[in-house]
Every structure is written in structure tokens, then in C-alpha cells.
């Protein structure tokens, strides 16, 4: 009888441990892309990840203004009624031809993993000669109360000119963490 009790306790403990582990789920998150151009230097010089309140379309209207110039930082606390959008900035470039593409968004418990490809300027192509900020806005929707984290995982790729079309030919730094943020839903 004592062995049965020990086995039963062990089974319950194993069930509790396995249910406590966060299962990774790929989200059907939609991304909106933009390439901001500024005449004055902004403060976003490197890869950045922000959590913002609102839809990607609403946030995009204000990106080239206050967020890029650093006039206001998005708050890190939102309500359950707020839609949350993650904003991925690739950084400041002195000419165009670079972009960011969201490959997938995963969620494990209260942690979001944003997998992005940083695509570098294709050789042999003309690019715009202006400061640019490649960005992607990822809608993750409304969340329940709690503390959350988001991590930006980046794969760098280079493009090459191949007989009239651009072909991605090289991949480096597969899924390297570039930035992370914490935010809270109250």
C-alpha cells in the first residue's frame, strides 16, 4: 500500500511539472512593414524592440514622429482592453536597400519570440540615398493580466543579383537574440 501511495504521489508530481512547462505555440500574427525616412537624425541607431498600444495602422502614423525622434517612449504598462503591437526597428541606415521581414512569432507562456530576417542591400541594385529606418509592426492583440516579455531573434541574410531578379544566397547568424523587452498588462 505504501508503494502505491508513493507511485501515486510521483505521478501527480510529474503531471504538475509537465503542465508548468510552457508550450511553444506559433501565432498567426500579421506584420505591417514600413521604411521610415527622416531628414534629421533620429535616436534609434541599432535594433530595437518596443511594445505599443494600438493597431499597427494607428502606430505607423506616429512612428516617424515621436517614437523615432525619442520624444516619447511607449509605456510598458497596458490595460486588458488595449491591443498590443510589437514594433521591430532594424536601426538607422544612411541609404536604403535594407529591410526587415517577420518570419514567425512564437509564444511560450508569457514570452513572445519574434523571429525576423534582416535583409541586406543586394549587390548591383540602386538604392535611395536617404536615412532610413526599416521597421515591422506585429499585432499580437489583447492579452490577459500579467507580466510579459518579448525577444527579437534575428537571422541576417544577404541578397545577390541573379539574371534579372534578386535571390537570397547567404544566411548568417541564425536566430541570434538582438533585443528584449518586458511589459505588463494590468
Image: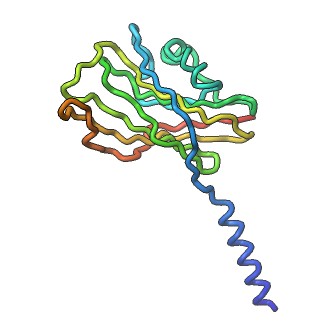
Residue 119's place in the image compared with 25, above or below, is above
Please tell me which residue lies in front, 53 or 67.
53
Write the residue at 35% across / 15% down: 131
- Residue 171: image quadrant is top left
Does 73 sit left or right of 184 as displayed?
left
Instruction: Count all numbered tags in the image, as a single digit.
Output: 0
Percent of width and height locating residue 175: 41, 46
Residue furthest to the right: 1
Write the residue at 64% across / 41% down: 148
Please tell me which residue lies in front, 165 or 106.
165
- Classify the position of the N terminus by image quarter: bottom right
Residue 10's place in the image compared with 49, above or below, is below
Does 167 sit left or right of 10 as displayed?
left
Residue 107's place in the image compared with 41, above or below, is below
Please tell me which residue lies in front, 105 or 39.
105
Residue furthest to the front: 164
- Classify the position of the C terminus by image quarter: top right
Colouring convention used in this rendered image of the protein? rainbow
Percent of width and height locating residue 125: 22, 23
Please tell me which residue lies in front, 59 or 90.
59
Percent of width and height locating residue 13: 72, 72
Residue furthest to the bottom: 1
Percent of width and height locating residue 140: 61, 36
Write the residue at 55% across / 32% down: 138
Amino acid at each position: 500500500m505504501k508503494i502505491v501511495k508513493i507511485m501515486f504521489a510521483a505521478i501527480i508530481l510529474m503531471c504538475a511539472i509537465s503542465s508548468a512547462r510552457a508550450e511553444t505555440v506559433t501565432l498567426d500574427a500579421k506584420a505591417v512593414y514600413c521604411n521610415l525616412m527622416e531628414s534629421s537624425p533620429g535616436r534609434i541607431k541599432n535594433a530595437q524592440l518596443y511594445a505599443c498600444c494600438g493597431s499597427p495602422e494607428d502606430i505607423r502614423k506616429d512612428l516617424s514622429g515621436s517614437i523615432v525622434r525619442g520624444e516619447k517612449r511607449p509605456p510598458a504598462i497596458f490595460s486588458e482592453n488595449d491591443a498590443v503591437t510589437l514594433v521591430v526597428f532594424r536601426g538607422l541606415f544612411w541609404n536604403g536597400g535594407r529591410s526587415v521581414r517577420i518570419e514567425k512569432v512564437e509564444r511560450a507562456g508569457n514570452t513572445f519570440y519574434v523571429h525576423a530576417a534582416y535583409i541586406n542591400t543586394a549587390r548591383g541594385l540602386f538604392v535611395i540615398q536617404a536615412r532610413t529606418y526599416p521597421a515591422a509592426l506585429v499585432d499580437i492583440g489583447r492579452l490577459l493580466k500579467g507580466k510579459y516579455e518579448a525577444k527579437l531573434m534575428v537571422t541576417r541574410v544577404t541578397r545577390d543579383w541573379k539574371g534579372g531578379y534578386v535571390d537570397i544566397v547567404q544566411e548568417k547568424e541564425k536566430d541570434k537574440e538582438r533585443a528584449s523587452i518586458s511589459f505588463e498588462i494590468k
